[in-house]
């Protein structure tokens, strides 16, 4: 198993440490609240004890979830275990709602159906004050780590304990009002405690609704608001992307996964499409840092395609490469001539059948074409064993003299003559003017090759490499 990066080790340690401290604090606070709540008979304190008891369960669930969620992906969980944190937050939401049901039920009973005498004590205020201090500390600690590592489970815990601070303050206020009512014989203030408990329930329900929306969205793979449009805009600006076909986003724990389909020109090479995919990934990660991005490229016809592009696109569709494509307009009818390389191990019948099918598809895709003539060439599939380089000064002088007849050829050098399977191969470098059009360079090369073979019929193949004058001067 590969060694875990140090940053991941640090993250796991900090998350587990803060979650473990939260459990210990929850045990202490819950125990004290239960003890004081039973002693005083305060529904406000008992509701807080129930709230803290469920918070303890939630803290334990959170601790377990962060221990599991940071485990790496495996064969059964290809997206990792991050969803455990989202599920943990969902469980905490359910526990909070159960707390609210009990508090509201008991509060209504004490307001309208039965009377419970409250006995506020110094210990009640001490415990609730201590609870506020502890909850403030652990809420900030959890919030800091949750924000640092984008942990939804720790964020839910931090949210719980931040509301505990307010709800504990409301309970203290309720006890103070009960004491005030007794001191000044204000009868209606005896209901301050159950009213305070209902306020606590209202706070918890408000927090639960916010948490519920976040956890349900995460579990249902809802995309963050506005992020999809940001990704579409960023990807659409990537050079080479014709259209953004699909963007799907899902979250597992603190990790986002993005599935993006983009339209690329159908005649781009596989290697170029890989470069575009890397640029698309970078664009998505600028919106969602560290996101796991999958890019699927879809071939599309570019509006800027010309007739030659359309012909090559059909060949590319079959993983074939056509070259030396020429098109003639004869009395309003287009005639195409092209060269196509096929595996030299094919039989003539197989090669001809492939070409016939390819030509038919080209005419179907480009109806303007009247006829197609394909020159079939063999694509080498084996490495040829060559013999020694032949030194033939007389042949070299003759070839240079022929090249000198072409005014466009400024220089001819690096002439090499090889013998391969008993046949002569000639290669050379020719210098041309920098601003000479490539079409003219090609024509001169073709004429030179013909003249060389005419002068020396023993030549089997001629290869001319053109160079600009500035490059030759270096």
Image: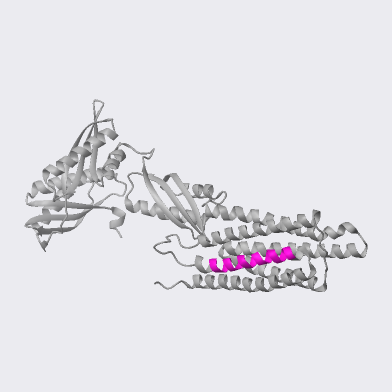
- Residue 45, position as x, y percentages in the image: 75, 66
> Does residue 20 appear in this view?
yes
Q: Nearer the viewer, residue 404 or 128?
A: 128
Q: Main secondary structure of the magenta part?
A: helix
Query: Height in image: 325 above or below 64?
Result: above
Q: Nearer the viewer, residue 37 or 27?
A: 37
Number of residue marks: 0
Q: Quadrant of the N terminus?
A: bottom left
Q: Nearer the viewer, residue 365 or 48?
A: 48
- Residue 108, position as x, y percentages in the image: 76, 54
> Could you tell me which residue is drawn at 41 percent across and 61 percent down?
76
Q: Quadrant of the C terminus?
A: bottom left
> Could you tell me which residue is drawn at 34 percent across and 44 percent down?
266
Q: Where, by quadrant of the figure, is residue 92 drawn? A: bottom right
14 lies left or right of 263:
right
- Residue 425, position as x, y percentages in the image: 12, 55
- Residue 358, position as x, y percentages in the image: 22, 39
Q: Is residue 63 magenta?
A: yes
446 lies left or right of 293:
left
Q: Which residues are magenta?
A: 46-65
> Could you tell me which residue is drawn at 11 percent across and 52 percent down?
398
């Amino acid at each position: 198993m590969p060694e875990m990066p140090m940053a991941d080790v640090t993250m796991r340690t900090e998350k587990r440490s803060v979650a473990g401290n939260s459990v210990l604090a929850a045990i202490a606070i819950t125990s004290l609240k239960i003890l004081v709540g039973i002693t005083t008979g305060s529904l406000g304190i008992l509701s807080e004890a129930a709230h803290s008891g469920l918070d303890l369960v939630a803290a334990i669930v959170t601790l377990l979830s962060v221990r599991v969620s940071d485990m790496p992906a495996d064969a059964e969980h290809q997206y990792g275990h991050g969803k455990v944190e989202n599920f943990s937050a969902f469980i905490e939401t359910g526990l909070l709602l159960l707390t609210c049901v009990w508090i509201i039920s008991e509060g209504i009973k004490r307001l309208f159906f039965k009377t419970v005498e409250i006995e506020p004590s110094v210990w009640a205020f001490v415990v609730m004050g201590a609870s506020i201090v502890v909850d403030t500390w652990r809420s900030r600690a959890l919030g800091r780590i949750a924000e640092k590592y984008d942990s939804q489970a720790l964020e839910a815990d931090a949210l719980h304990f931040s509301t505990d601070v307010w709800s504990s303050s409301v309970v203290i206020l309720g006890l103070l009002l009960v004491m005030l009512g007794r001191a000044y014989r204000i009868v209606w203030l005896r209901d301050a405690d159950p009213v305070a408990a209902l306020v606590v329930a209202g706070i918890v329900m408000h927090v639960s609704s916010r948490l519920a929306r976040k956890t349900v969205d995460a579990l249902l793979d809802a995309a963050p608001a506005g992020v999809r449009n940001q990704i579409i805009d960023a990807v659409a600006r990537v050079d080479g992307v014709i259209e953004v076909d699909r963007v799907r986003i899902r979250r597992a724990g603190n990790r986002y996964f993005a599935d993006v389909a983009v339209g690329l020109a159908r005649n781009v090479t596989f290697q170029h499409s890989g470069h575009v995919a890397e640029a698309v990934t970078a664009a998505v990660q600028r919106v969602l840092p560290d996101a796991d991005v999958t890019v699927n490229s879809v071939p599309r016809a570019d509006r800027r395609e010309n007739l030659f592009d359309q012909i090559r696109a059909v060949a590319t569709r079959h993983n074939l490469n056509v070259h030396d494509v020429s098109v003639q307009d004869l009395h309003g009818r287009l005639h195409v001539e092209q060269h196509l390389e096929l595996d030299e191990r094919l039989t003539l019948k197989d090669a001809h059948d492939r070409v016939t099918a390819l030509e038919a598809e080209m005419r179907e895709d480009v109806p303007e074409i009247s006829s197609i003539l394909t020159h079939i060439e063999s694509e080498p599939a084996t490495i040829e064993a060559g013999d020694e380089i032949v030194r033939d000064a007389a042949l070299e002088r003759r070839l240079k003299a022929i090249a000198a007849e072409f005014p466009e050829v400024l220089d001819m050098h690096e002439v090499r003559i090889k013998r391969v399977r008993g046949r002569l191969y000639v290669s050379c470098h020719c210098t041309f003017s920098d601003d000479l059009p490539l079409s003219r360079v090609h024509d001169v090369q073709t004429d030179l090759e013909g003249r060389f073979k005419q002068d020396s019929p023993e030549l089997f193949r001629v290869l001319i490499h053109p160079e600009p004058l500035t490059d030759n001067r270096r």
